[in-house]
Amino acid sequence: MKAGIVIFPGINRERDMAIALEASFGTAPRVIWHKDTNVAGLDLVVIPGGFSFGDYLRCGAMAAHSPIMRAVKAHAERGGYVLGVCNGFQILTETGLLPGALLRNASLRFLSMDCHLRVERADTVFTNQYQPGQTFRAVMAHGDGNYFADKDTLDRLEGERLIAFRYTTKAGEVTPEVNLNGSARSIAGIFSPNLRVLGLMPHPEDLVDPLMGGTDGKPLFDALAAA
Ligand SMILES: NC(=O)CC[C@H](N)C(=O)O
């Protein structure tokens, strides 16, 4: 699978994402500037985290209108893979590739800390190297990670099994105490209906090497590399 990373002004997590992808894929991802207009030849488009356009207006709202996003949308409509992490997830919701929105954290504070994610389904190209129901450690670093969608959308996401990850305790329990940003139904990440677009707030790329303090995020990149 050939991967590329899209960069917008203010994005700052592309190096970490490139290192994580290269460690699993064996080749460096293509780097694409937001003013480019095509993603031809790529199987996977990754939108990394950061502060695109300084988080002005709303996180991800301006990036969603960059020229490259038309090509990313067409790529997704053709059945291509897309991964959005943190600001990347926000950009995917603003683009309409994933439903809902990421609101200001319930505490109104920027949260920078470890969390545990429960794997809600492990039969996807992104998650098949985890076990269903398994928890893994990830790092959150965001001001606007409070996932919101209306009740019908949340019911549909649950009914169609499109919730990828939930914030839980290490033992896998959903509790309000560990849903630190206040996300609806403790949702940390969701899939598109064809399971080829994944957006999540915490950063799996932060834990892909023992030198980083853990490798809990590596199975996600290994799974993509093996697809
Ligand atoms: N690490 C990130 O991508 C942060 C996303 C966004 N700037 C926020 O604070 O919510």
Image (cartoon, rainbow, N blue to C red):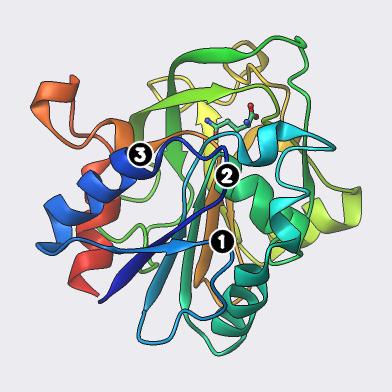
Q: Residue at x 55, y 90 (%)?
A: 78
Q: Counting other residues with Cα less than 10 Å from the Cα at mark 2, is it few (<14), some (14-19), or many (20 or more)?
A: few
Which residue is at the front of the view, 114 or 39? 39
Q: Residue at x 77, y 62 (%)?
A: 156
Q: Is residue 130 above or below residue 10?
A: below
Instruction: Determine which residue is flagged by label 3.
Output: 204
Q: Is residue 78 above or below residue 51?
A: below
Q: Please identify the residue farthest to the bottom as the structure is shown.
A: 78
Q: Counting other residues with Cα less than 10 Å from the Cα at mark 1, is it few (<14), some (14-19), or many (20 or more)?
A: some
Image marks 3 and 2: residues in contact by CB distance under 8 Å: no
Query: Where does ligand 1 appear, by image quarter?
Result: top right
The amino acid at mark 2 is Pro
- Label 2 sits on a secondary structure element that is loop
The amino acid at mark 1 is His
Which residue is at the front of the view, 103 or 41? 41
| Measured Cα–Cα span from mark 1 to mark 2 | 8 Å
The amino acid at mark 3 is Pro
Residue 158 visible, this angle: no
Q: Counting other residues with Cα less than 10 Å from the Cα at mark 3, is it few (<14), some (14-19), or many (20 or more)?
A: many
